[in-house]
Image: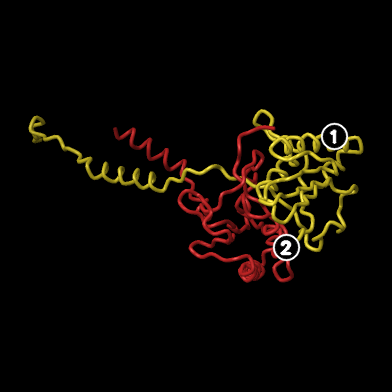
Chain colours: A red, B yellow
Amino acid sequence: MIDVVFQLITFFMLINKFEQAEADERVVLPKDQLAAPPLVHRQHSFLLNFGYLRDQKGVIIDPKPYFFFGDERAELASVRSRLRQESQYYKTTGTDLAEITVEIRADAEVPTGLVQELIQMCQEEGIEFQRFALKATQKATEY
Amino acid sequence: MKFRNRSNLTKIQLDMTPMIDVVFQLIIFFMCTLKVSEPEGDFEISMPLGAPNAAAVSDAQLPPFKVRLQAGADGRLAALTFNGTNLGSGESAFAKLNSEVLRAVNALGAIGKEQQEKQEVEIDSDYNLNYRYIINAIGACSGRMQNGTTVRYISKIKFAPIRQQ
């Protein structure tokens, strides 16, 4: 019995993903078969969760999309100051902004224009991020 | 020398109860923290500073392949075009886009492999189109899966300027 129990512990330890703690479950990602994890681990990146408030069944309860920062939520316009802070942080640590990847976890139903506005905001003077990764879940269908 | 009588030795019983308790606590912890989620991946988009619009200077010698996505009133895909050719709407449109991109990339092969690698795709979408279609379009332009491996078509993907509502 102890052997089996240890096997179970090992199993749960291996399949547990503590890395994705930043991923917000309210965001329903789009799916695509070619969305693959990066081959090389990104040294400098930060994540933006952009989605809708949903009920327990996953139905959208507020038509306005928000950015989720843990328990806090913000609209697109108020994200600018956070991006500026993030950019300032990397500048003070001497990290080249061209090395930073902005990982965008946007909901499948968010209007594309808002994601484009976010990217544009990330490129404004004083923020100046250049690399972006659009998150999606992997779908196992083939063309 | 005096030896103790071996027959009088009592066997020490190891108490396993605390260890089993701890082990069960560990199992419960791992079971509770287990998140069953689909594996996530991403698509890298390169948007160099100072090149926010389509007219910006690009290192590609040829103009980018243009993928245009038009939205219906509800944010669904109404029409998908590749370099001006209408591919329809729905799932089949992305399959067609995938084969059109492959054909275009193969045609570039005649110019040179270097050009194939430099070639860009520009995604031009309506403002209110659901974001899922953009990901599908990027996926269809990026390549295809064949026997579990990825066949890469194009890796340079960018967005056209925002179309205001």
For disc 1, the chain is B
Name above or below for residue B149 compared with residue B117. above
Question: For the residue labelled by badge 1, is the local secondary structure a helix, a strand or a loop?
Answer: helix
Please report the residue visible at 78 percent of the width from the left and 38 percent of the height from the top.
B87
Identify the mark at residue B23; answer none if there is no mark. none
Instruction: Find disc 1 in the rendering and name its residue.
Output: B106
Label 2: chain? A
Q: Which residue is mark 2?
A: A120
Rendered image quadrant of residue A83: bottom right
| Furthest residue toward top | B147
Q: B113 left or right of A40?
A: right
In-front residue for pair B8/B46 = B46
Q: Give the residue displayed 62% in from the left and 43% down from the top.
A: A31
Dot 1: within a 10 Å radius of its alpha carbon, few (fewer than 14), some, or many (20 or more) residues? some
Callout 2: SS? helix
Of circles 1 and 2, the one toward us is 2
Amino acid type shown at disc 1: Asn
Q: Which of B64/B165 is in front?
A: B165
Could you tell whether B117 is left or right of A93 in the image? right
Q: Is residue A4 above or below residue B80?
A: above
Residue B165 is situated, as x and y percent measured from the top left of the image, at: 73, 60
Badge 2, how many Cα within 10 Å: few under 14, some, many 20+? some
**Residue A130 coordinates in the image, percent (x, y):** 73, 59
* Residues beneath discs 1 and 2 located on the same chain: no
* Count of residue discs: 2
Residue A58 % position (x, y): 50, 49
The quarter of the picture where the C terminus of chain A appears is top right
Q: Are marks 1 and 2 in contact (CB under 8 Å)?
A: no
* B32 or B161, nearer to the observer: B161
Q: Residue at x 67, y 51 (%)?
A: B75
